[in-house]
Amino acid sequence: PGAADATLAAFRALAETDRLLAEDHEIPALLRALDGRFVAPVAGGDVLRSPAILPTGRNLHGFDPYRIPSAFALADGRAQVEKLLARHAADGGAYPESIALVLWGSDNLKSEGAPVAQALALMGAQPRFDGYGRLCGAVLIPIEDLGRPRIDVVATLSGIFRDLLPLQTKLLAEAAWLAASADEPQDMNFVRKHALAHQAAQGIDLETAALRVFSNAEGAYGANLNHLVDSGRWEDETELCETFSRRKSFAYGRDGRPEPRRALMQAVLAGVDLAYQNLDSVEVGVTSVDHYFDGLGGMARAVAKARGTSVPVYISDQTRGEGRVRSLSEQVALETRTRMLNPKWVEGMLGHGYEGVRQIDQHLTNTVGWSATTDQVAPWIYQRITETYVLDEAMRERMAALNPAASAKVAHRLIEAHRRGFWTPDPETRAALDRAEEALEDRLEGITAEAAA
Ligand code: BEZ
Ligand code: MG
């Protein structure tokens, strides 16, 4: 009876969520706001983690920046970092001395700062709170309590993180500085080991050599690799690295102010053993939007260039349950099976008409973005996408009718992926792709000519 009650309550809550999602609260609230009238406030959040954020269309107040990361996030951060280290070890990786982590604003807000807490856990640091419980800095966990070496962490912040979380930006910089300046053996403190090496090699002070928080210049966002990949106009990997470094090499120090530090960033990236980012929502995957390959792929490419060899890239999936770590190639394969190659997903997209076909094209472009930045996309993925969307005549026809420009782009992109060596179709498949591209092009021009007439 207890279990039945709980199930009934869960279904009632789901029905209520469904009702709230189906009602339009946003347009009326927007009109109220434009009239200068009151819009009720609510805490922002993720609809799966906190259904109480519904109905939408209210005035979001996100978070209390003095309470991030929370105690819960700190405990979770330690647990997730253990999973990451265990996965890397299971893959045969040596104990990492340095880890590159991409931090976004949105997932930190939704999780009370869990990814920030992961960075602190790797370094063996914690936030410090004043008598009122307000965040006021970092403190090191004693090495004896940590029970393992401090791992060096290089964090690249999205521009949004940098804007939304200035206290946490300083917190991370202070944690790196405290670790770099701690009087501890270098084999138990890789932050210090590396900072001393950068200091000697570059003739810089320890404060500079301990900078580990990189982002864009103030007012700038993104690495711009997404635009390069979308345009298809990039020569080689060096150009991708160059763009990434130019955009993301501003080091944010303990004072929260950025300084251009390309040489240091290069040296820090050269020591990185693995790179990762968290994934926070089932709604959006690493192939759904171009920002994941832009930030994490860009960092992986820059690391490979600086080191001379590529390093493992992981996705820490925080979308459900206890969280789990996947290699990037596993993540891309999973997403491709459940989205691009899943008839239900495809039909759902086509139901959206023009925009749905554009989404299909974008998923393919993002997949190419991962190949370009990491080389970790399995060739079968391009083969199956080709079969599903281009070689299947009925599908090709439906897509071309809904969005001729995007369907021609799909064929172009698959050919570009072959030209760049991301997969190798057999000669018949390649010939079929060429014919399809030509037909789609003709159709596009035909339609354009008709519209012009
Ligand atoms: C962020 O929350 O930091 C973010 C969200 C979307 C794209 C890029 C960054
Ligand atoms: Mg964009």
Image (cartoon, rainbow, N blue to C red):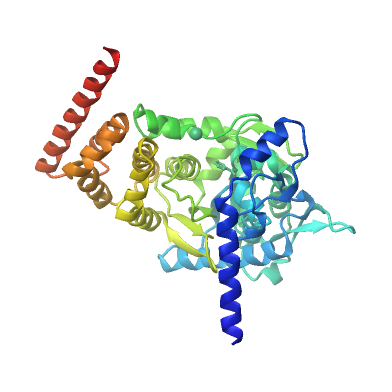
Rendering coords of residue 44 (x, y %): 68, 50
| Residue at position x 43%, y 51% in the image | 311
| Residue at position x 58%, y 35% in the image | 249
Tell me: residue 134, above or below residue 251. below
Q: Is residue 176 left or right of residue 8?
A: right
Q: Outermost residue, bottom direction?
A: 1
Which image quarter holds the N terminus? bottom right
Rendering coords of residue 72 (x, y %): 69, 65
Q: Is residue 206 left or right of residue 423?
A: right
Which image quarter holds the C terminus? top left
Q: Outermost residue, left direction?
A: 428
Depth check: give the residue in front, 312 or 431.
431
Depth check: give the residue in front, 162 or 85.
162
Tell me: residue 351, above or below residue 314. above
Asked which quadrant contains residue 396, the reply is top left
Residue 376 in sight here: no
Residue 378 in sight here: yes
Rendering coords of residue 189 (x, y %): 64, 59
Rendering coords of residue 262 (x, y %): 57, 33
Depth check: give the residue in front, 209 or 429.
429
| Residue at position x 34%, y 29% in the image | 232
| Residue at position x 67%, y 68% in the image | 146
